[in-house]
Image (cartoon, helix red, strand yellow):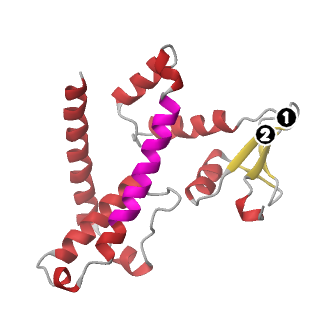
Amino acid sequence: MADAEKPLLIKRYASRRLYNTETSDYVTLEDIARFIRGGREVQIIDLKTGDDLTRQYLLQIIAEHESRGENVLPLDVLTDLVRSYTTQAQSVVPQFLQMSFEMLRDGQSKMMDNFTSLPPPMAGMPGLDEMQRQQRAFMKSMMGGWPGAQEDSPEDSAKADSSDKEEIEQIKAQLAALEAQLSKLNK
């Protein structure tokens, strides 16, 4: 296995400090989150016991983001996750979540491919450039930091302005409204 395919090994010392074995320096949870957003797998091991602590630290990273108001998980989803620990659904939930995220990543990739490889007649359609820009902004806000998510070119990044932020907020509000409607339908 090539080095790039191996998980980055992080060792936790008794002092709870986290040590990056590749760069021989200490790292923070935010550093680990940055490695993951960059597409790198990580493995966090307790130096003394050899226990794998990866899940515990990933959950801590998620909890910190959620507590700062970077809410990705709707309250209904969190509630259902808590319920799944005490029900028969516990065996199904992990596979369902994994398949859902794989479908989301695949759909994002296909959607971006479709928008970037439009046939010439569609390329001349009025408003297409704006629609593609909005779609990229939406997908970036939804998929930002996920492995395989397309990054903006420096030229695209330079064009971002406050109207992009406003549009993203509008899209988030629309998404929240759709989630609320779906939640009502599921009840």
Picture disc at residue 23: none
Q: For mark 2, does the 10 Å Cα neighbourhood hold few (<14), some (14 to 19), or many (20 or more) residues? A: some
The quadrant the C terminus occupies is: top left
* Left/right of residue 115 with respect to residue 50 in the rendered view: left
* Left/right of residue 104 with respect to residue 44 in the rendered view: left
Q: Disc 1 and disc 2: Cα gap in Å? A: 6 Å
Picture disc at residue 50: 1
Question: Mark 1 vs mark 2: which is more N-terminal?
Answer: 2
Which amino acid type is shown beneath numbered disc 1? Gly
The stretch drawn in magenta includes residue 102: yes
* Left/right of residue 25 with respect to residue 109 in the rendered view: right
The residue at 20%/26% (across/down) is 184
Residue that protrudes farthest toward the right in the picture: 48
Residue under pointer 2 = 45
**Does residue 123 lie above or below 150 as drawn?**
below
Q: Contact (CB < 8 A) between labels 1 and 2?
A: yes
**Does residue 121 lie above or below 110 as drawn?**
below
SS label for mark 1: loop
The residue at 25%/71% (across/down) is 132
Main secondary structure of the magenta stretch: helix
The count of marks equals: 2
Location of residue 153 in the rendering, given as x and y in whole percent from the top left corner: 43, 77
Boundaries of the magenta span: 93-111
Residue that protrudes farthest toward the top in the picture: 86
Q: Which of 34 and 103 is in front in this view?
A: 103
